[in-house]
Amino acid sequence: MDFKTHLEKSWNLTLKFIVPLIFMTLVMVTVSCLTFGILAPVTMAGYMHGILLMVREGREPKIQDVFSQMELFLPLLGFEVIVVIATIIGFWMLVLPGILIVLAVSFGCLYMMPLMTDRKLNLTDAVKESISMSLRENITDHVIVVVLFLGISWVGSFVVIGWLFTQPLATILVLSVYEERMSRIQRQYP
C-alpha cells in the first residue's frame, strides 16, 4: 500500500475543503457532547459518509451530512453501549484489558461505519466484513493505517483547534484506504 499517496491525497482534500470539514467536525462534536455521547456514533456515521462522498466523487461535504444516517441510530447505539460496558469492565479489572479492548475495536471495526453507510450492511455483517478487511492481505498495512488514524487524531486532541483540523485529515486517510481496499476486493470477487 502506498501510504505516501494516501497521506498526500488526504492532505490535499483537507486543504481543498477545509471550511466545510471544520464546520462538520464542530457540529459532530457539539451534538455528541450535548447528547452526552448518545448521538456520537450516528453523527460519526453521517460524518464519515459525507467525507466518503468527498473522497470518491469530489463532492463538497455539507453540515447536513452529519445527520444523514439517522436510520442507523439504534444499531450504533447498541454497539456503543456494548463497547463502553466492555471497556469499563476491562479498565475496572485492570487497566491493560481495557486498553486491549479499545485497541481491538479500533483495529477490527475501523471500516464498520463506511460499510454500513456505503454498502448498507447491517451491524453484524459490517463488523464481520470490517474484521475480514482488516485481516485480509497485509495485516501490517492495516496496523499502520490504525496507528496513523489514532496518532493523527491524538496529536490534534491536545488543542481543540488542532483537533478540528486533524480529525478530518485522519478520517479522509481511513476512507481513502477504504476506497482502495474496496476496489481491490471488487476486482478479486466481481
Image (cartoon, rainbow, N blue to C red):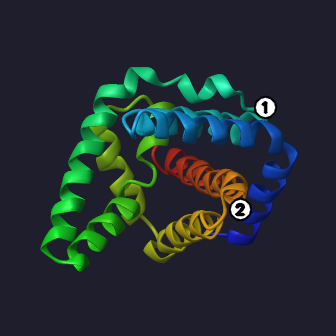
The answer to whether residue 44 shows anywhere in this view is yes
Task: Give x and y (percent) for residue 135.
Answer: 37, 65
Would you call the spot at circle 1 few (<14 residues within 10 Å), some (14-19), or many (20 or more)? some
Three-letter amino acid code at disc 2? His
Side of 139 where 91 appears, left or right? left
Q: Residue furthest left?
A: 93
Disc 1, SS: loop
- Residue at the disc numbered 2: 6
Please tell me which of labels 2 and 1 falls first in the chain: 2
93, above or below 86, in the image: below
Q: Quadrant of residue 110?
A: bottom left
54, above or below 182, in the image: above
Determine the residue positioned at 45% across, 50% down.
111
Three-letter amino acid code at disc 1? Glu
Would you call the spot at circle 2 few (<14 residues within 10 Å), some (14-19), or many (20 or more)? some
Instruction: Decide which of 95, 128 is in the foreground and name it.
Output: 95
Task: Give x and y (percent) for residue 171.
Answer: 61, 52
The label shown at residue 60 is: 1
